[in-house]
Amino acid sequence: MAVAYKLQASGRVRRRKIVNSLMESAATIASVAAIAVLGLLVVSVLLKGVPALSWDFFTKGPAYFGQSGGGIANALVGTGLLVAMATGMSLPVGVLVALFVTEFARPTFGRVVRVTLDVLNGVPSIVIGIFVFALLVVGHLQSGYAGSVALAIIMLPLIARAAMEVLALVPASLREASLALGVSRWRTVVSVVLPTTFSGILTGATLAIARAAGETAPLLFTSSITGNLVTTDVRRALPSIPVTIFTYSEQPDPALHQQAWAAAFVLIAFVLVTSLAARVLLARSRSRLGDLP
Amino acid sequence: MRQPADALARRRRFGGRLGDAALYALTGAAAVGTLALVGLLTYKVFAQAWPAISKYGLSFLVHRTWDPIRGNFGALDFIYGTALTSFVALLIAAPVSIAIGLYLSELAPRGVRGIVGSLVEMLAAVPSVVIGLWGILVLGPFVAHHLEPALHSAFGFLPIFNGDPHQAGQLPAIIVLTIMIVPITSSISRELFLSVPREIEEGALGLGLTRWEMVRGVVLPYTRGGVVAAIALGLGRAVGEAIAVTQVIGASSGIHVSFFAAGDTLASRIASEYQGAASNLQISSLVYLAAILLVFTLLINVGAQVIVSRFEFQRTGGS
C-alpha cells in the first residue's frame, strides 16, 4: 500500500521543531555546565584540601616563619566566636523585626521595613565592613567585637526575611482561636505563634550562619590583623577561617596554599552541610504548616 | 484580624495590656532600629569619606591617579574596572541563568528538578573566598596557559583579546563573577517561571506552539519584570563582590581594553588595601570608593524594586 501522508514534519513546521530542539538543548547544556562548575570546585577543594588535613591542622595555630606544619585552630575558635556573637545579636533583633511587621505594623510601614531589609541585603559586604570600621574601629583598634557586629548586620536581613516568610504562613485561625479564648496578644505571640514557626525561624538562622561563616569582606577592616595564638579575647582582633584563606591565597608559599585548601575544605563542608540541612528542615516545616487548618 | 483583637482589648487584664504594650514597643524598636541602621550606615560612610569628598569633590570620579606615596587619589580606573567586569559577566550570566531557570521549570524531568535545583543553590552557598582561592590557583593557570592563547589565536584581531596571557587579570575576574551571579539569578528565574499559571502554558501548547514558542510568547513576557529584577540583583552582587575579585584580578591601576590585562574594581581596591593605608587621606579615599559603591548598589536595588512594582501594576491592572 502506498503511503499517502508523510509523518515527517516538513517546511515551516520542521524549522520550528529544529529551533525548539536547539533551544531545549541550549537550556540543558547551560544547566549541565553550571553543575560541572560546582563539581570542578568541589573536586579541586577535595583533591587539594583533604591530603593536608591532620590532627595538628585542627589543634595547632599557624607555624612560625620558617617552620613547617601548623594548623588553623586559632581561626576555628575565632570563627566560632565571631559567628556565635553575631547570631546572638542578629537572631533576636531579626525575629522582633519580623514580628512587628507581621503582627503589628500597618501595611505601608511593613512594606517600608521589607524594602529596607532588601536594601540592606543588597549592600555589598565590603561596604558593611567599611561602615563598622568607621563606627567602631577608627580611633580604637580592630576587635572581635567589631567583626561580629559586621557579621550581624549581614545576617539581620536574612533572618528577618526568613522569619517573616514563616510567620506569614501561620493560619489566622490559629491566632484568632487563641485570642477568642481571652488570651492576650503578647501571650498569643509567645505561646502560639512563635512555637509554630520555631523550626522555620531556626532554618533561616542556620542559613544566615552558613553565610556569615564564609564572609571575608566584613572582617578585613574589623578583625583581620591577628596573631598566631588561639585566643578568645573579643576586645582584640580574632582570626577567622575566611580571612586565613584570603591571606594565605595571596602568599607565594605553596605550603600556605596547601593550608588554604584544607581550610577551604573545612569551610565548604560546614557551609554545604548546614545549608543542605537547613533546606531539608525548611521543606519539612513548610509541609507541617501547610497541614494546619 | 485587627477587629476581634480590638474588641477583646477591653476585657483584658492589666497584665495582658502591659505585656502587649511591651511587645509592641520592643518589636517596634527593633523595626525602627533597622531603618535607623541603614540611615546610620549611609551617614557614617559619607562622614568617614568627607576629607576626600571635600578635597576632590566629584572630580574624584574622573580622576585617574591612585598614588598613596604622593597622596593623590582618583577612582576612574576602578569605576572602569568595575563596569567592565560586571557588565561582561552579566552579559554571559544573564542568558545562561535564564536558560537554567527554563530547564528547571519547563524541561527537566520531575526527579531531576529537585536535585539540579539544589545543586545550583549549593553553588550559591559556596563562600566567595573559596571561589577566589580556586580562581587564583586553578582557574588562573588554566586561563594563562590554555584559554587566553586559544582566544588570542582565534579572535586576536579584537582589541579585547589582544596582549600577553596572564594568570591574574580581568578575564579570570569576569569568569569568577559569572560563576557567582549565575546561581542567584537562575534560582530566582526558576521561581518566576514556575509562577506562570499552568492554564496559559497549556493553552499555548494546545494551540500547537512548540515549547520554545510557548516560552517566548507566554513565559518570558509574563515574567519579564521579575527577570529584569533578578538580573539587576545579580549585577548588584557582581559590582559589590570584593574578595574573589581581589584574588584574581591582579590589582593594577590603569584602563586596559584587553581582557587579559590586570585591573582593579572599586570593591577589590578597598579589599586589597585593608592593611596598607598610610595616611588619613588614603583611608578616606578608600571610604569614598565604598561610598560610590554604596550609591551604585542602592540605585541598582531601588531600580529593581521599581521595575518589579511597575510590572506588577501592568500585570494586575493596578488591583
Image (cartoon, rainbow, N blue to C red):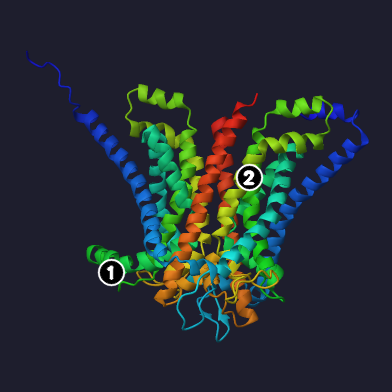
Give the spatial CA distance, label 2 vs label 1: 47 Å
Q: Residue sitting at 66 percent across and 62 percent down?
A: A148
Residue B250 in sight from this viewpoint: no
B207 vs A104, left or right, is: left
Image depth: mark 2 or mark 1 in front: 2
Give the image location of residue B245, x and y in percent: 46, 65
Looking at this rendering, what residue extends furthest in the front direction?
A: A55
Give the image location of residue A177, x and y in percent: 76, 25
Q: Quadrant of residue B14?
A: top right
Q: Give the residue pinned by disc 1.
A: B145
Decide: few, some or many residues near mark 2? Use Cα within 10 Å; few <14, some 14-19, many ≥20: some
Q: Quadrant of the C terminus of chain B?
A: top right
Q: Quadrant of the N terminus of chain B?
A: top right
Q: Residue sitting at 82 percent across and 25 percent down?
A: A181
Q: Residue sitting at 62 percent across and 48 percent down?
A: A205
Asked if badges 2 and 1 are on one and the same chain, I answer no
Is A39 situated above or below B256? above
Label 2 with label 1: CB-CB less than 8 Å: no
Is residue B58 or residue A135 the one in the foreground? A135
A123 vs A94, left or right, is: left
Is residue A201 or residue B98 the one in the foreground? A201
B74 vs A261, left or right, is: right
Say which chain tag 1 marks: B
Q: Amino acid at mark 2?
A: Leu
Q: Residue sitting at 39 percent across and 43 percent down?
A: B100
Instruction: Report helix, strand or loop for mark 2.
Output: helix
Q: Amino acid at mark 1?
A: His
Is residue A122 or residue B140 the one in the foreground? B140
Is residue A139 or residue B251 the one in the foreground? A139
Decide: few, some or many residues near mark 1? Use Cα within 10 Å; few <14, some 14-19, many ≥20: few
Which mark, by number, is residue A202? 2
